[in-house]
């Protein structure tokens, strides 16, 4: 699988993502500046975390208007894989590639700690190396992770099996139905708030996040 | 036009004698802009006029020191061709007036000091002191400062990995916000600020200049009073997004050979950066302010020269590389403007709208800056505490200590700081005595800490200064790392008062002795004086930031114990309760002498502990500091939710809560092996107990407290306060 990592001004977790991809894929991901529009040759587009454009208008809103996002939409429409983490998730909802929105955390404070995530299904390209219902640890670090959508959308996500991960220990940011990550209807676009890429090395406290990248590498 | 005279000079912070010197240098009455430039360059904040003579007493050299004080930050050799670049700096005055922006721009400023030298920042830490938690204003300041540090650090993507927090009424009107950044660079890619090359372009990069922060450096050099609220406009406003762009743009530009010299615009903005760059290079500089990117209309030369707008850098470039440099800077959506050039005149000449607004000889501006050997009175040595006892049970005392604001868990604070971004954080906050951050692509890691115990410093500045250095050294040692060097942040009151100056002098003497004994040179630092409100000074607070290195990051030890281990105390215990947290919280006293700092014992005990850790013989290690033995054991137990039994040790409060220095608790498989090694090395060691499978802590004498009760006590303060 050939991966590319998008770089918007203000993104700050691209280095973490490069390390996780390099480790599982055994290849170097391509770094793609937000003004580029050619994603040819890529199987997977990753949008990492950070504060694109400072999150000044609304998290992800300005990045969603960057030239590269039109190419990402084409890539997704063609059935390409897309992974958005944290700010990347916010950019995916702002671009309309995933439904709903990420609001300020319920407690109105930035949250940085490990959380436990439950794998809702393991028959996707992102989760095949996890067990169904498996609980794994992932660091989270966000001020705006409170997932929100109208009831009809939430019912549809749940009914169609598009909830990827739920907070298992504590729903600290107040997300609707404890949703931490969701899929597109074709299960090829995944957005999630916590950072599996920051837990792929025993030295950093564990490898709970590694199966996600191993799953993609095996696809 | 305002008339320039001694009265105006006084309002700018220059006394009559200093103003007379300005006239002597200029040979005429200075212009308004010139007076502004002199006043900020000669402010305490920029000139170190009260502290310079004493800072020279600190040791600054070692074979591993690449650049000591005098550059934007200190630079040390950490092996494999890499350098660690670091410094700590205060943003105290602004953080009281406007806590969020004061703290945020403190983080931004120290980051720039580090990346301006070519380093990618890999860790932020802080050292914070707040007033009495019972006061509503303290709550407001704590909230704003924590949000500000997080707001800036999280956005720029540099992990905030450690720090310290104290509360004391002496900081009621004068909180301290000291921020530290550590960065990494290749040793052959370090950038300095000395300008060179007559005719080379002087380039302005970053945010546009506004009217914020004018005379901030002067504000930071005076006491506070009831009118301080009016100084809000002198606080700068931070933009971490632009800072992130500036980091990436500068690091990208530094991969080329375009840069001759580079300096961030910090305190006193364009004035200090241009004066220092030209001054250090022994050249002259000419600036045309019409070309300065401005975000407000009608700004005068004076306003532009004194603005402290954030996220700006000044560069001297090779002319043939300037267009390439422009392309890189503009790719990151930052302003790039040629605002002048280097000359051979030895003068700074400022032109605006065709008028020469300032023309000052550079050498006397720095060389003739005021230098004061201010009178001081030594702090009288405190009387020893003498015998003291308490009817409080050990369990009640322990629960009270671990719940008090100075000892309770800092989780509520560090849970608001991104500590994992970068993917290299080996030990996160509270997991070990010093934060551990790996150097990407290597097995090496840095151990980083900040430390100071102001309640010791106020009683005995010399012992307190030595203790701050020793504790930083000990915290690094407790992880297994080798301590290398120190940055200091000297926070004191009004130096014009002899007793305050005496505190400063005492602290320097103690620090110097400890730095020499521990081979721990000072490579950078910052002095913040006039930390007084309504005439009342803070506790003397020489905050120490320190860096050590581990060749093999996997050997780093944390404080978490596990079942099946013995607990061994290293170091001698006489039961020093003077100025202890126990004395304050249980007896309501802040008296006596602080614990003795025996630097030879510190060195010997620490070297022994590090040797044992690096030999892979130690499972966990925690140094003993505030609160003493039982507090340390509690922290080790809570870190992993593992019980411990210390039934057999001395039940006296002095033994359990005394703050004797140079001590560690080690968790090992078999105490006998460690005790034998310690005996052979002549290091005091005793077995104090063992870990257990039941989730409780069994105290000396046999009373057991469940870990849940201990955790509730330890973690309650901040969440309750901010509920």
Image (spheres, coloured by chain):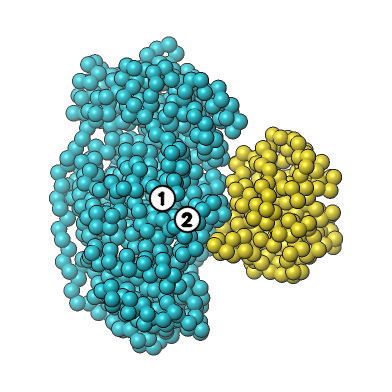
Chain colours: A yellow, B cyan
Q: Residue at x 64, y 69 (%)?
A: A169
| A11 with respect to A181 (left or right) | left
Q: Chain of mark 2?
A: B
Callout 1 crowding tier (Cα within 10 Å): few <14, some 14–19, many ≥20:
many
Q: Chain of mark 1?
A: B
Q: Residue at x 71, y 35 (%)?
A: A36
Snapshot quadrant of residue B70: top left
Snapshot quadrant of residue A132: bottom right
Residue B468 placement (x, y as % from top left): 30, 58
Label for residue B78?
Answer: 1
Snapshot quadrant of residue B213: top left
| B477 with respect to A32 (left or right) | left
Contact, mark 2 vs mark 1 (Cβ under 8 Å): yes
Q: Secondary structure at mark 1?
A: strand
Residue B393 placement (x, y as % from top left): 34, 83
Q: Residue at x 60, y 41 (%)?
A: A10
The residue lying toward the viewer, choosing from A173 and B442, is B442
Q: Residue at x 22, y 77 (%)?
A: B388
Cα separation between marks 2 and 1: 9 Å
Which quarter of the rendering shows the C terminus of chain A? bottom right
Label for residue B444?
Answer: 2
């Amino acid at each position: 699988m050939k991966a590319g990592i998008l770089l918007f001004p203000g993104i700050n977790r691209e280095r973490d993502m490069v390390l996780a991809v390099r480790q599982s894929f055994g290849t170097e991901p391509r770094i793609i500046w937000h003004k580029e529009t050619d994603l040819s040759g890529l199987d997977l587009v990753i949008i990492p975390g950070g504060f694109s454009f400072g999150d000044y208008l609304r998290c992800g809103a300005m990045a969603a208007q960057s030239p590269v996002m039109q190419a990402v939409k084409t890539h997704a429409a063609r059935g390409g894989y897309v992974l958005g983490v944290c700010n990347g998730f916010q950019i995916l909802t702002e671009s309309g590639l995933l439904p709903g929105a990420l609001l300020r955390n319920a407690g109105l404070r930035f949250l940085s700690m490990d959380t436990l995530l439950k794998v809702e299904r393991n028959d996707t390209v992102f989760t095949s190396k996890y067990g169904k219902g498996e609980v794994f640890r992932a660091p989270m670090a966000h001020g705006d992770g409170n997932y929100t959508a109208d009831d009809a959308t939430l019912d549809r996500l749940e009914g169609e099996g598009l909830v990827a991960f739920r907070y298992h220990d504590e729903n600290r940011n107040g997300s609707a139905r404890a949703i931490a990550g969701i899929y597109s209807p074709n299960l090829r676009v995944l957005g999630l708030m916590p950072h599996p890429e920051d837990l792929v090395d025993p030295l950093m406290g564990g490898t709970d996040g590694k199966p996600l990248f191993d799953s993609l590498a095996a696809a | 036009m305002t008339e320039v005279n001694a009265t105006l000079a006084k309002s700018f912070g220059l006394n009559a004698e200093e103003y007379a010197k300005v006239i002597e240098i200029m040979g005429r009455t200075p212009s308004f802009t010139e007076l502004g430039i002199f006043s900020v360059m000669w402010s305490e904040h920029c000139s170190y006029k009260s502290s310079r003579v004493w800072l020279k007493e600190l040791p600054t050299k070692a074979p591993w020191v690449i650049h000591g004080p005098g550059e934007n930050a200190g630079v040390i050799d950490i092996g494999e061709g890499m350098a660690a670049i670091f410094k700590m700096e205060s943003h105290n005055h602004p953080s009281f007036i406007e806590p969020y922006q004061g703290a945020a721009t403190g983080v931004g400023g120290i980051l720039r000091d580090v990346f301006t030298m070519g380093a990618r920042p890999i860790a932020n830490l802080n050292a914070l002191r707040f007033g009495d938690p019972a006061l509503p204003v303290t709550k407001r300041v704590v909230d704003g400062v924590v949000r500000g540090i997080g707001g800036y650090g999280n956005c720029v993507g540099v992990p905030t990995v450690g720090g310290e927090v104290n509360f004391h009424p002496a900081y009621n009107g004068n909180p301290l916000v000291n921020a530290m950044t550590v960065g990494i660079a290749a040793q052959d890619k370090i950038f300095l600020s000395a300008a060179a090359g007559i005719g080379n372009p002087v380039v302005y990069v970053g945010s546009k200049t506004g009217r914020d922060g004018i005379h901030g450096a002067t504000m930071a050099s005076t006491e506070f009073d009831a009118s301080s609220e009016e100084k809000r406009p002198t606080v700068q406003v931070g933009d971490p997004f632009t800072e992130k762009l500036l980091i990436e743009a500068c690091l990208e530009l530094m991969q080329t050979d375009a840069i001759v010299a580079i300096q961030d615009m910090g305190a006193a903005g364009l004035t200090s950066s241009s004066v220092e760059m030209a001054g250090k290079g022994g050249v002259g500089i000419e600036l045309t302010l019409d070309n300065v990117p401005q975000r407000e209309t009608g700004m005068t030369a004076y306003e532009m020269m004194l603005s402290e707008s954030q996220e700006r850098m000044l560069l001297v470039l090779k002319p043939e590389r300037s267009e390439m440099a422009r392309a890189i800077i503009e790719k990151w959506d930052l302003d790039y403007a040629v605002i002048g050039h280097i000359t051979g005149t030895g003068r700074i000449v400022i032109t605006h709208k065709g008028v020469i607004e300032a023309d000052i000889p550079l050498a006397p501006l720095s060389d003739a800056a005021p230098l004061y050997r201010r009178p001081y009175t030594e702090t009288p040595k405190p009387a020893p505490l003498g015998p003291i006892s308490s009817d409080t049970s050990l369990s009640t005392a322990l629960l009270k200590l671990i719940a008090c604001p100075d000892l309770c868990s800092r989780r509520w604070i560090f849970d608001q700081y991104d500590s994992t971004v970068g993917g290299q954080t080996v030990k996160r906050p509270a997991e070990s005595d010093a934060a551990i951050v790996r150097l990407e692509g290597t097995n090496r890691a840095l151990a980083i800490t900040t430390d100071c115990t102001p309640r010791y410093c106020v009683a005995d500045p010399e012992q307190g200064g030595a203790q701050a250095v020793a504790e930083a050294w000990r915290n690094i040692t407790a992880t297994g790392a080798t301590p290398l060097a120190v940055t200091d942040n000297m926070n004191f009151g009004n130096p014009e008062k002899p007793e305050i100056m005496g505190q400063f002098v005492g602290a320097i003497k103690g620090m110097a002795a400890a730095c020499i004994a521990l081979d721990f040179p000072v490579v950078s630092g910052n002095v913040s004086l006039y930390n007084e409100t309504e005439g009342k000074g803070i506790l003397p607070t020489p905050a120490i930031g320190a860096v050590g290195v581990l060749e093999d990051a996997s050997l780093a030890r944390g404080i978490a114990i596990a079942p099946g281990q013995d607990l061994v105390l290293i170091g001698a215990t006489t039961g020093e309760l003077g100025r202890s947290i126990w004395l304050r919280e249980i007896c309501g006293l802040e008296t006596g002498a602080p614990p003795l700092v025996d630097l030879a014992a510190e060195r010997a005990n620490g070297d022994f502990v590090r040797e044992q850790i690096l030999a892979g013989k130690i499972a966990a290690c925690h140094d003993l500091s505030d609160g003493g033995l039982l507090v340390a054991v509690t922290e080790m137990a809570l870190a992993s939710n593992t019980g411990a039994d210390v039934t057999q040790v001395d039940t006296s409060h002095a033994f359990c809560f005394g703050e004797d220095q140079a001590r560690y608790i080690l968790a090992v498989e078999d105490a006998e092996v460690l005790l034998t090694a310690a005996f052979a090395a002549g290091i005091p060691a005793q077995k104090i107990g063992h870990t257990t499978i039941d989730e409780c802590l069994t105290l000396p004498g046999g009373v057991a407290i469940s870990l849940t009760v201990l955790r509730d006590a330890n973690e309650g303060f901040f969440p309750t306060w901010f509920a």
